[in-house]
Amino acid sequence: MSFIETDKAECMLSVLINTQLRIAARDANVRRFFSNSACAYNAEKQVDTNVIALKESGAYTAVPGGGYRR
């Protein structure tokens, strides 16, 4: 909760990104849509742009990034 209170701009960007994805999914007639923050994944897997794409099976919250480490 402290992240939401102290980093409101970043939270709003996340909300806007998810909103745009949801609108695009609706427009494409996607029936099911799941959205998540990259913070559900180990931050160490997100530092290299050449990394293999993150997958749901790789969700691991023990090493969160950014404001989640307060």
Image (cartoon, rainbow, N blue to C red):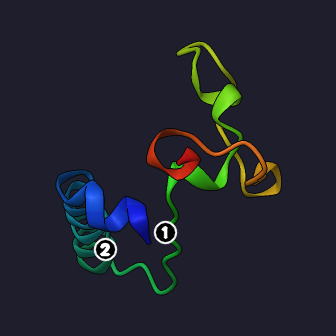
Q: Nearer the viewer, residue 12 or 52?
A: 12
At horizontal 53% and vertical 51% (from top left) the residue drawn is: 68
At horizontal 69% and vertical 27% (from top left) the residue drawn is: 44
Looking at this rendering, what residue extends furthest in the right direction?
57
Q: Is residue 12 visible?
A: yes
Q: Is residue 54 left or right of residue 29?
A: right
Nearer the camera: disc 2 or disc 1: 1
Amino acid identity at mark 1: Ser
Query: What percent of the width, then of the height, locates residue 34?
Result: 53, 74
Secondary structure, mark 1, is loop
Disc number placed over residue 22 in the picture, else none: 2
Query: What percent of the width, then of the height, locates residue 28?
Result: 31, 72
The part of the image, by quadrant, that contains residue 69 is top right
Q: Is residue 64 left or right of residue 31?
A: right
Q: Nearer the viewer, residue 17 or 10?
A: 10
At horizontal 78% and vertical 50% (from top left) the residue drawn is: 62
Disc number placed over residue 59 in the picture, else none: none
At horizontal 56% and vertical 40% (from top left) the residue drawn is: 65
- Give the quarter of the figure containing the N terminus: bottom left
Q: Is residue 52 left or right of residue 9?
A: right
Asked whether the beta carbons under mark 2 and mark 1 sit within 8 Å of each other, the answer is yes
Secondary structure, mark 2, is helix
Answer few, some or many: residues within 10 Å of disc 2's Cα (few below 14, many 20 plus, some between 14 and 19): some
Looking at this rendering, what residue extends furthest in the bottom direction?
31
Is 44 rendered above or below residue 41?
Answer: above
Q: Is residue 17 visible?
A: no
Mark 2 or 1, nearer chain start: 2
Query: What percent of the width, then of the height, locates residue 66?
Result: 47, 40
Is 28 rendered above or below residue 16?
Answer: below
Name the residue carrying label 1.
Answer: 35
Between marks 2 and 1, how big is the CA–CA gap?
8 Å
Amino acid identity at mark 2: Arg
